[in-house]
Image: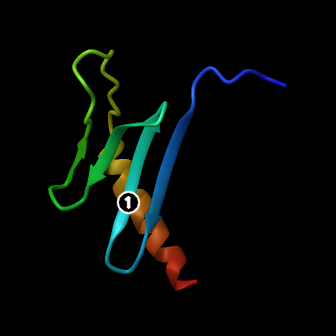
Amino acid sequence: SADVLHEDLAINGCSDSDGEDMYTLEGEEVWYADFINKRGVEPQTSFIGHITYPGGYEQAVANQQICRGNLKN
């Protein structure tokens, strides 16, 4: 059995009218796509080493397009 050093989670989903794309580390949200304001949000506290996701919002938009295409199938 392997010891788990860190736990991360990526959630990506959509419906006909809404979408979600977010990442967590150790149970804390570190990035999510704000599709209303068309930007990525990094809601991290000031006392941790800041994690950035360059190109994250553009990738989230592409993921949503793929997801909505899959809904039609």
Q: Which residue is mark 1?
A: 20
Residue beneath the point at 52% across and 42% down: 9
Residue 21 pos. (x, y %): 39, 54
The image shows residue 52, relative to residue 63, as above or below, that is above
Position above or below: 48 against 56: above
| Image spot of residue 45 (x, y percent) | 25, 25
Q: Could you say which is closer to the camera, residue 62 or residue 51?
A: 51
**Residue 31 found in image quarter:** top left
Q: Image quarter for residue 3?
A: top right
Quadrant in which the N terminus appears: top right
Point 40% across, 64% down: residue: 64
Tell which residue pokes out farthest to the bottom in this image. Answer: 72
Image position of 69 (left or right of 35) = right
Please tell me whether residue 50 is drawn above or below residue 19 in the rendered image. Answer: above
The spot of residue 72 in percent (x, y) is 51, 84
What x and y, as percent, mark residue 43?
25, 36
Q: Residue furthest left?
A: 37
**Number of numbered labels in the structure image:** 1
Residue at 44 percent of width and 74 percent of height: 68
Question: Residue at the spot x=53%, y=35% of the render?
Answer: 8
Q: Quadrant of the C terminus?
A: bottom right
Q: How is the image coloured?
A: rainbow
Q: Secondary structure at mark 1?
A: strand
Mark 1: which amino acid? Glu
Crowd tier of the residue under label 1, counting other residues whose Cα lies within 10 Å: few below 14, some 14–19, many 20 or above: some
Q: Is residue 54 above or below residue 9?
A: above
Q: Going by the image, does 45 lie left or right of 72?
A: left
Q: Name the outermost residue toward the right.
A: 1
